[in-house]
Image: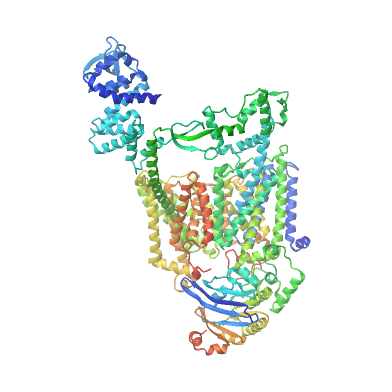
Amino acid sequence: MTALLEVSGISVTFDGFRAINNLSFSIGPAELRAIIGPNGAGKTTFMDIVTGKTRPDAGNVLWGERSVSLLKLSEAQIARIGIGRKFQRPTVFEDQSVTDNLIMALRAPRSPWAVLGWRARAPDLARVADLAAEVGLADALPRKAGELSHGQKQWLEIGMLLAQEPQLLLVDEPAAGMTLAEREHTTRLLVGLAKTRAVVVVEHDMEFVRRLNCKVTVLHEGAVLAEGSLDHVTRDQRVIDVYLGRSER
Amino acid sequence: MTRSFLARNPSVLVFLSILALFTLGVTLLSEAYGTALISTSFIKTLGKTLCLCLAALAMDLIWGYAGILSLGHMAFFAIGGYMIGMWLMYARTEEIVVAALANEPLPATAQEIQNGIAGQIFGVVGASELPPVWLFAHSLPLQLLLVVMVPGLLALVFGWLAFRSRVTGVYLSILTQAMTLALALYLFQNDSGLRGNNGLSGLQNIPGLAGVSQAAVSVWFLWASAAALGFGYLLLAWVVSGKFGSVIRAIRDDEARVRFLGYSVEGYKLFVFTLTAIIAAIAGALYYPQAGIINPAELAPIASIYLAVWVAIGGRGRLYGAVIGAAFVSLLSSWFTGGRAPSIPLGFYTINWVDWWLVLLGLSFVAVTLFAPKGIGGLFDLVQGLRRPDRKGAALGPDDGALMEREAQE
Amino acid sequence: MRALVAALVAAFLMLVPAMLAAQTAARSVAEILVENRALVEKPSRQSIGPVIAALAGSGDPQAATILAAWADRGLGQRKSDGGFFLIAPNADGYALTALDGSDAGTATKSEITELRPNSGVRGLISVALVQFRLTDPDPARRAEALATIARDPAPELLAPLRASLDGEADPALAAQKDRLNRLLTLRFDPDSAARVAAIDSFSGDLGLDLRAALNPLLATVRKTAPLAAQIDGNIARDLTPGDDLPQGEAYDLLVAANLAPARLSPADLKAALVANIVNGQVAGTPVAVLNTQVARNAAYTALEAAGSVPLAATDEEVTQAVAAHRFAEVYSEPDPAVTTAATRVLKAIETKLALMQAADLGLDALSLASIYFLAAIGLAITFGVMRVINMAHGEFIMLGAYTGYVVQLFIPNYTLSLIVALPLAFAVTFAAGVAMERLVIRHLYKRPLETLLATFGISIALQQLAKTVFGTQARPLTSPAWLDGALSFNDVVQVSYIRIAIFVLALVFLVVFLFIMQRTRLGLEVRAVQQNPSMAASMGINPDRINMLTFGLGSGIAGIAGIAIGLFAKVTSELGSDYIVQSFMTVVVGGVGNIWGTLAGAAMIGGLQKGIEFLNPSNTLAAQTYMILFIILFIQFRPRGIIALKGRAAGD
């Protein structure tokens, strides 16, 4: 199985602080992966690098069968190539309706000229309705996104990610601030998604990671400390020292 | 397509009807075609106001919808005026020179006519040769093309440089202001080829229409301005109604998120910047023949800030708000500064509005920003019973240009 | 003509003394006058030279007095006996003094004929008098004579100047005389070697007088000659037509040298055609088709063929004529040794001059930079620290300048008024800033674009208010006398005291700012609020109060900057808006949130503007245009400014 995303030897420094230190990582086309690590381990910076927000000082990020280097692409190009990102706090366009939010995310040409002439046709609206139903927002379509509850915004954002039809999903702390029921719903959603595409979940919450039941990568000080099943890494003495020993959250 | 678009946006139909009625009414009250109740100079003022409304529409698209506070759009407006002014002045002078040379025993050569025109136009700045920028001034179609091309290209190059390096928010505002200042200073030079601080004058005399009275010409320009405003409104309403409008409003509120959706934010900004620059230029090209004169002072950065003020007072993020703001403030301004507003005697001091109008405008602008960010447009929301959302003071997005809580509708 | 006469007189003056010294040493002035009575009665410039020379060289102690009197209509002739007297008008005629200095009684007006030399003769006399003035016992008169010579050098002055060299006792005057002697020598000495030596003696000198003396030596004229002949004279360089000499100008030279017929101008051609219109036709061509130059040329050629107009050069003939001649630039100075030496010395001077000019430019840039720094430092605080765009900052500068003006109305002593105005301006603008922060800006935090527009509203209101109160004309803010004048290093490098004062003021502000921010409790709290307002609040700092004080501080500094700017620019209501864009540029280019960045930004913008002005000196407007374009490009490469906060600290 060839890797979908191949990150090799990246390093990045902020004002002398090494946020990422010679990190290598790879994930296959239909795989669910959890990344854990203490605060400042470089989890968010890692996602910033993959999505093009931050440029690494060294190393390489290759994508897909044709091994395209992501380092030369802009954020928008990386998003178009098939990498979706969900932020920790739900970020939807609050001044616009749920429909508009989903339509913007729908897979379609993204250039200004194409968008200018684009008008929603019946199949597009049907697809929007399907997505809304999938994430449980079927009744909320005409409402403004700003009026939704916190959990609903999370689902809308996931719906927008689905509309993008990405091959790789980067999800930042999806369970934060959710009720137990919402967590279970989110777990099912993520596991379901990973059947057709790669999903990387960055999470603090061990219980949630255990429920995902997938391979785990432990980051520490910007490098991979251990990799394997959750049981495997939690038995690793180094992991216990740096992470579990300090994880009081 | 268009029918369904109008059906979905009834406000466009309402606006166009009001505009048509206004134009018809003014025509019927004009000196040339009606009861002469409105003086020709006031018709010119109305026509100019329509052009300013068009420029304000462009400003609303770039600021109200895309969240980019450009302080350079009056520069594009003035460049449009300069471009059409070059043809007007050249062609008009050519008529005069040809008429003068017709009395000579020999028919004039092209070179003699050219020299005569150059001498007439550039005598004031001590030059006698036509500068290279006047290469196309003899041709109306070419110069009309330049009305669109010059500001368009300038906006394209400037915008590409600015957006590419991710200059946003107030930095971009300051940068556009600097661009405007640079242009104004450039045009103030005598060797800029555009007559330095004399500017271009006599633009109200339309070449080839010597026999037509200014009364009629002013009404024609009113029609042209109204038509341009109507088309501009239609075009912009169409642009903002679809997914494009959705995307640029999303850029206004949270451009980083739009990037992660796969839209090239810079491309959209550049598109909107250039489009609005062209619209502003067209408005300027219609404005200055009615004003009669254009000089570099028109490009002063302050003019572009006024444009933003109009949009803010009218209510940003709604097209009719921009039109109302521009019309309201500029008409009020010409009423106050024209000396027609009655002075207020306070006993110890008499408030003379020519002196105090700017103070009033400045302070009322502060008041609008502080207390009524929806501007005049907010009144329509009151009438329609729309309330603003309760967001506990949070804006609708993290970016500088994002809508404020009090600007949004529920 | 005048130069010729002058040269002749000079030759006499140089030769005659030697001759006369032998022959006429014993003769008195009176004798000479009597001998040349006819010439003296009706003097003319052409003929009087030898007489004046003889008088000057007579050795008579009264000679100088008499010559001066003659030039000044103080010399008369008694009609009865033809005797010469020094005359002074009195109540009933003239008081007479004999030429030997003894009193000779009085005479009525009718008895005396005043000698009235014309201006040309008076000029010759005054040249002759120079030698007396140069040896005058009074050093002040000698210095005056030197200044006269330096102002209006002439060949005939060389000899008297040299003659006076030896006797000079005053060392300063001796040096001055020596320099003047060399300057005159290099221009007027007949001996080539002496001139070259004089030129070389100046090597490395930067004086304006030297450049004024050398430059005329290298003046050139363009000359032409047929290819077969040589161009005579001291050739500076050969010119190739079409290359370094435009074809048209080359032909004009030929015409001027009578080597070719004048070219027919389009106007003359037209006039010739008009003169030959017969029945609506010119040489058979209908007038109506003569609306191109080609058609007109053809018609003229037809007229030429018919012999009704003179021949005129066609373009082809012009080309041929130009090709058949050589062209050169020729020095008006005939001596090649002199021009070579002058070129060499001037080149050395230019090199040195360029260095000096660079130094001068550096000083200029420095003072402009300190002005921008002063104008921007307040912004660096409000914009850089608080991220508040204050478009009314320029109006605060204006407010400070007007405060200075008003204080001067009440306190006429400029020094005292300045001392009062500086803190007062700070207080006024501090109060204005605090009021603005409380009333407006506080409600718009985190909304920079709205702040921009609201403060712009305040800006236009303040500007109009100032216009209404103080009127539109510029008001003076006069600097104290001790700030007038300039510190001058040499003829090239100088800097006015007021600019030095502004530079010092800028330095003081830098130090004060650093002290406040780094060493005081207020600075600590300001930095805390800047970095994390809620954390600061939880530690007992009141962010509202800190923001208010910070904004007041920034505004107050703007007021002081206003006084500094008002001192060298006139105070108008637009004073502030002239500086606001540059100030923002300074802060943005330098890097927001860092005082060193503002300093670097001011240095860059000031240096850039002066540099561009130097390259294109005629046009400060263009310099500003190019500078702004440069800044727009610069921001491409360093969007966060010269000194940028990097990485996560930048908080993007």
Q: Is residue C84 visible?
A: yes
Query: In the rendered image of this protein, does residue A231 appear above or below residue B78?
Result: below
Question: Please, which colouring scheme is shown?
Answer: rainbow
Q: Position of residue A12 (x, y in %)?
A: 51, 73
Q: Quadrant of residue C337?
A: top left
Query: In the rendered image of this protein, does residue B29 appear above or below residue A4?
Result: above
Front-lying residue, A19 or C401: A19
The residue positioned 44% from the left and 58% from the top of the image is C600
Q: Is residue C428 visible?
A: no
Front-lying residue, B321 or C164: C164
Q: Position of residue B176 (x, y in %)?
A: 57, 56
Query: In the rendered image of this protein, does residue C104 appear above or below residue C266?
Result: above
Q: Position of residue C563 (x, y in %)?
A: 42, 51
Front-lying residue, B117 or C245: C245
Using residue C96 as the reference point, say whether residue A103 is left or right of it.
right
State the residue lying farthest toward the front: C228
Looking at the figure, which quarter contains the N terminus of chain A? bottom right
Front-lying residue, C412 or C574: C574
Number of marks drawn: 0
Q: Quadrant of residue C424?
A: bottom left
The residue positioned 70% from the left and 49% from the top of the image is B225
Using residue B108 as the reference point, say whether residue C483 is left or right of it.
left
Q: Position of residue B259 (x, y in %)?
A: 62, 68
Query: In the rendered image of this protein, does residue A38 appear above or below residue C335?
Result: below
The residue positioned 66% from the left and 47% from the top of the image is B287
